[in-house]
Amino acid sequence: MQIKSILFAILGAFFFVFSFSEQAAAQTKKTFDNAYGLVGTRSLKLQWLGEKMGKVKIQHEGEGEFSIEGSVESNGDYCVISGTLLPIDANRFRFEGIIRTRVSFINNGQECLKEATLENAFIFEKKNGRKYYRLQQMENCEGNNVVDYVDVFEF
């Protein structure tokens, strides 16, 4: 009788642990599949364009991977983003793809192409309770401490 009780206790513990880990895995998958609420159409901003906001579309592509496509444009100046986002945590995303900016009074009015690869990915990060994720690789092609603030807003 005692062996039977021990066996039932072991089986019960196994099912409890398995059920709990299944729930935790499902919650983690849901969080990453939702990209912390970022999936959908969001605002895009480049500080050189003043208050002008563009749009980006973020879509779930599977296995914690998301596509991002969009742009903002004002008077011939622009910021275009195209690539893949991989969530790191609630405040950071890894970006692989291309960001093109052009501002008439920076870099002699020439386009600045920033390319993030698997080996050299960029990071978007949300800090200090802000409502946007800012590209951390900010240096413009002009150099000379000229930086681009490329921001993707939460909502």
Image: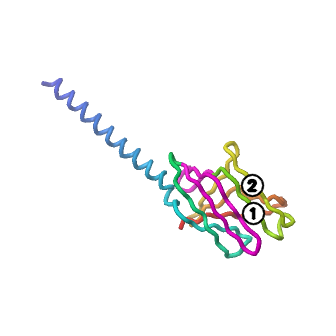
Kindly identify the amino acid type of the residue bearing the numbered disc 1.
Answer: Thr
Residue 105 against residue 87 in the figure, above or below = below
Q: Identify the residue at horizontal 69%, vertical 62% (top origin).
A: 80
**At 76% across and 62% down in the image, what residue appears?**
147
The residue under label 2 is: 114
Number of marks in picture: 2
The quadrant of the rendering that contains the N terminus is: top left
Q: Is residue 68 left or right of residue 39?
A: right
Return the residue nearer the eye: 131 or 66. 66
Residue 130 visible in the displayed image: no
- Asked whether residue 149 is in view, the answer is yes
Q: Which mark is residue 101?
A: 1
Residue type pointed to by label 2: Lys
Give yes or no for contact between labels 1 and 2 (Cβ–Cβ under 8 Å): yes
Task: Look at the numbered disc 2 and give the secondary structure of its residue.
Answer: strand
Q: In which quadrant of the rendered view does residue 68 lie?
A: bottom right
Which is the main secondary structure of the residues drawn in magenta? strand
Residue 132 percent across, percent down from the top left = 59, 65
119 relative position to 13: left or right: right
Residue 143 falls in image quadrant: bottom right
Q: Which residues are magenta?
A: 65-94
**Element at label 1:** strand
Q: Position of residue 151 (x, y in %)?
A: 64, 64
Of all residues shown, which one is farthest toward the right? 108
- N-terminal-most mark, 1 or 2: 1
